[in-house]
Image: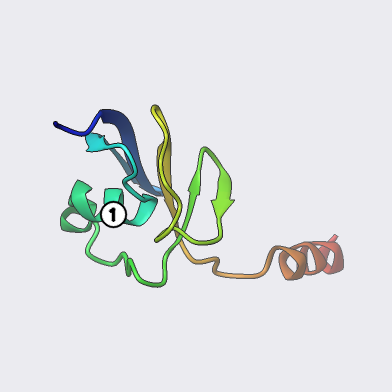
Amino acid sequence: MDKLKIQVEVAYALPEQQKIIPLAVVEGTTAYEAVQMSGITHFFPQIELDSAKMGIFGKSIPEPKSHALREGDRVEIYRPLKIDPKQARLNRAKKG
């Protein structure tokens, strides 16, 4: 018997470009597996999957390799921060 397929999306964005890839995956597929299956690294080779932070609709996933997806989930791959947000606020406050 075939496993049930669910519809999910994998998303990555740069300031000048974004990509959302729809996928049909078997129930129980993890966020990490969906990202691998999506082939998004062909579009963005700078993504390092093993260290990339991921989330579902803006909510961080601590363990993408074990987080099972649900119907309609959008896995977002986050870019590393250039500067800590607290430090950025301090820098702006010093200027202001």
Question: Mark 1 — residue?
Answer: 33
Q: Specify the quadrant of the image occupied by residue 94.
A: bottom right
Quadrant where the image shows the N terminus: top left
Residue 12 at x, y = what percent? Answer: 36, 48
Camera-nearest residue between 2 and 61:
2
Please state if 2 lies on the left or on the right of 50 as rendered: left
In the displayed structure, 90 sits above or below 66; it is below
Label 1 secondary element: helix
In the displayed structure, 82 sits above or below 3; it is below
Q: Specify the quadrant of the image occupied by residue 88.
A: bottom right
Neighbor class of circle 1 (other Cα within 10 Å; few <14, some 14-19, many 20+) is some
Q: Residue at x 23, y 56 (%)?
A: 36
- How did the renderer colour the structure? rainbow
Quadrant where the image shows the C terminus: bottom right
Q: Residue at x 67, y 69 (%)?
A: 84
Please state if 94 lies on the left or on the right of 25 as rendered: right
In the displayed structure, 82 sits above or below 20; it is below
In the displayed structure, 50 sits above or below 29; it is below
Residue 56 at x, y = what percent? Answer: 49, 42
Q: Residue at x 81, y 68 (%)?
A: 90
Camera-nearest residue between 50 and 3:
3
Camera-nearest residue between 8 and 86:
8
Q: Residue furthest front?
A: 1
Residue 55 at x, y = what percent? Answer: 50, 49
Q: Residue at x 36, y 50 (%)?
A: 30
Q: Please, what is the three-letter code of the amino acid marked with disc 1? A: Glu
Please state if 46 lies on the left or on the right of 61 as rendered: left
Residue 73 at x, y = what percent? Answer: 42, 34
Please state if 70 lies on the left or on the right of 48 as rendered: right
